[in-house]
Image: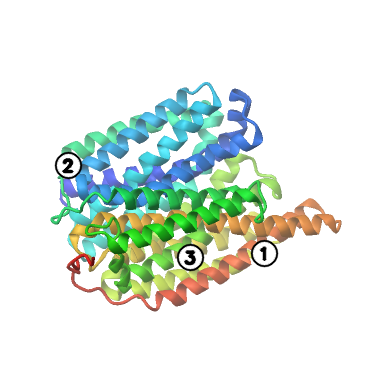
Amino acid sequence: MRTDGRTGLVLLASCLAQFMVVLDVSVVNVALPAMRTALGFDAEGLAWVVNAYTLAFAGFLLLGGRAADYFGRRRMFLVGLGIFGFASLVGGLANDPALLLAARAAQGLGGAVLSPASLVILQTTYAEGAARAKAFGWWSAMGGVGGAAGGLAGGVLVGLLSWRWIFLVNVPVVALTALLTLAVVRETRAEQRPGLDVAGAVLVTGGLVALVYGVVSLESSPWTSARVLGSAAGAVVLLTAFVMVQRRSRQPLVPLWVFRIRAVSTANVVILLITSAMFSMWFFVSLHMQGVLGFDALTAGLAFLPQSASVVVGSQISSRLVSRLGPRAMIVAGATLTAVGFAWFSLLTPTTSWAAGILGPGIAVSLGMGIVFPAVTTAATSGVDGSLAGLVSGLVTTSRQIGGAVGLSVLSTLAAARTATLTAEGASAPVASTSGTTAAFTVAAVVVAIAALVALLVPAPQRARTPEPAQV
């Protein structure tokens, strides 16, 4: 991609931010045992080291995206960096479980401001077309690499230093990114400045938090528990009230007519479906390598390197072809390849080696996802007026996060049930675990195949859509 010096540095700042935000979803997994020993976490509290981040991140994404339109994209990007960096410092220095959990929630809040702002900065820096598609390609690749690199980065930092450095390492990266931002990113905000829809913000944030809380509670509670059902009911009530408020608001947080833009609605459905399967790959493959193949954490992290490289390769292929072939063709091709990879994964057996059963399908899934994400981001954000840039970026990121959280919880519950059934029937631990994993991968293949069919509805790019007047 040919860029001048300034736009290249803008891209670097946005990609560094996206890498950090996604990396911090998964990097803590390897460090959980060390945190438990150092701070005295119980089992449920330890799970919330992961869940507190997920909950705050998913809950505040839409609000973060809209805040970028209202207060300015560079300003909110810097605010997100500040929150994320300070929370990382507090987390790295924490000496009790409550403080660490608070820091993780604050990290999630910072990420919810930072991630949509980073995307909309690229959208407003690069003109629509090939240059923007390539920038989105790098941004999407950093998200994929961040997810894949979590195990490796966590293993190296915990093994060579301590668990505290999985947080402290963010501080210098945040400082570098902030300096880059101050030097090269120009301030932009929506030409038609949106109003502050306080009621809408409270309702949608509460609804998303309730939804994700119910989903992550599935890790320790059954579907029929009061915690899960109560959270689901709360989410339905709050999100229904949010829709009613948006229909009547003169300046809504989320103008509902934006979902009538077919590119926006179909692209977000595709993202939701794809990420519901994608997050499961890192989770189940990591468990299989360590629990069945006997890899240690560092070896398992190194074994993910081909997948990380494949995400980057796929994103660059997509970003170079999307302006010529259109996003629909790239999304369908990438989703089809991803579905094939998951179907290939479903053939795993307890005795299948890494080279024979994980390397090939892992590359197929990662390459396919790398192809999908720049194209689907292009489809969701092209043809949308600049006043909605932050909102649409927030929708894209929210769909990714909600899809990942829901998909992982549903598939892990399915896998656990299958494993428990076979264990009760007398199957060995490796056989039962592998069967649960392959059942989850079979469902993931079907879900991604459905995403490929939905992608056929993605329209050709259109000129920017002018906002419709609010309907009272």
Q: Nearer the viewer, mark 3 or mark 2?
A: 3
Q: Nearer the viewer, residue 239 or 433?
A: 239
Residue at 23% over, 34% down: 179
Between label 3 and label 1, give the one nearer the viewer: 3
Q: CA distance from mark 3 to mark 2?
A: 36 Å
Amino acid found under the numbered disc labelled 1: Ala
Nearest to viewer (mark 2 / mark 1): 1
What residue lies at 38% left-to-right and 47% top-to-bottom?
60
- Disc 2 residue type? Val
Marks 3 and 2 close (CB-CB < 8 Å): no
Reading the image, the residue beneath label 2 is 184
Residue 176, by quadrant, is: top left
- Judged left or right of residue 376, residue 446 is right
| Residue 363 visible in the current orientation | no
Q: Which mark is residue 439?
A: 1
Pointer 3 local density, CA inside 10 Å: few below 14, some 14–19, many at least 20: many
Left or right: 231 with respect to 4? right
Give the amino acid type for the residue marked by disc 3 in the picture.
Leu
